Amino acid sequence: MPYQPVPPRYRPLRKIALVSIVLMGLTSVATVIQSVLMWRSYDEVKRFVYGLLSEEEVDRAVGSIAGTGPLLNAVSYLLMGTAIAFLIWLWQARENTEFLRSPLAPRPVVQDGRPHRHATGWIVGSWFCPFLQFWYPLQIVQDVTVASEPPEQPGASKRGPVRTLLYGWWATWTGFWVILIGGGGLAFLAFIVWVVRLVDAADTADATGDYVDIYDLQDFMVRVALAVNIGFTVATLLLIAAGVTASLLLLRVTQWQHDQATIPPAAAVTPPPEPPQYAPRYNNPGPTFPSYGPDQR
């Protein structure tokens, strides 16, 4: 039996778009709470580093830090859920653009050239490929947005608020991950440096019999803790901005596709009847009358 391709069909995006938006909001709220807890514990971290906490306060601080673990896990789970919902929306939106260009659409969209620069598999794979993940996902979302714009508004996706939403979302989303991953790596490296310097100072004190002065090392760790708090706060603000811009972009593209796929083309307007045409008088001589010559008078 010969292979017959499955005709494209339209998938409503409103529900999955709303699920994505809700998950973005919950992730932002959980991240804000985590940032507030980090700042509230900053004074205790300083006192802990300088050795100013009593044994009871140390136990309470350790319990407070351990209590933030479930919240961090919740943030991670919410991020994963948001990513899954967004990718489902993006995949279906990409398939809908194929329907909008097919004869099955109420108003088929006609555009020159290939509407998408990358194959369908890159919708998921582009987010996990090193280096490519910094621009391939942006191009995929941009192509879907361009392919979804209304025919009566050509170029609407490349100018004005839609362009601002697209690039604003990508800039804030990329900045969030750069700070989160890069800042976390730098903080871990700083901790390793602190441990190495502490061991080196202890070995030097044992060799010389001098007192180990670790005040500089303590001050170094306090600055690292402050940098971590600042970095996480900036990342939280970027995540909120990314969630807002992504939500507005999802709603815009979803509405564009919905309008094109569900609204039938305007009915053809029947032209008004033309007024009756009358033959010119010179083409209708009318009745003839006898003529009299001079000899008939």
Image (cartoon, rainbow, N blue to C red):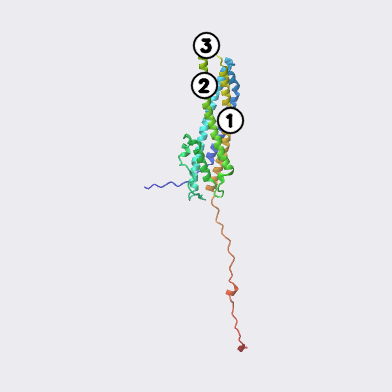
Disc 3 versus disc 1: nearer the observer:
3
Q: Earlier in the sequence, mark 3 or mark 2?
A: 2
- Label 1 sits on residue: 234
Identified by mark 1, the residue type is Val
The CA span between labels 1 and 2 is 24 Å
Please say if 110 is above or below 179.
below
Q: In this rendering, does residue 230 appear at all?
A: yes
Residue at the (60%, 25%) spot, across then down: 39
- Label 3 sits on residue: 208
Q: Residue 72 location, x and y as percent?
A: 54, 27
Determine crowd level at label 1: few under 14, some 14-19, many 20+ residues with C-alpha closer than 10 A. Answer: some
Q: Residue 222 location, x and y as percent?
A: 58, 21
Identified by mark 3, the residue type is Thr
- Label 2 sits on residue: 193
Please say if 274 is above or below 177.
below
Q: Quadrant of the C terminus?
A: bottom right
Tag 2's secondary structure?
helix
Q: Earlier in the sequence, mark 3 or mark 1?
A: 3
Tag 1's secondary structure?
helix
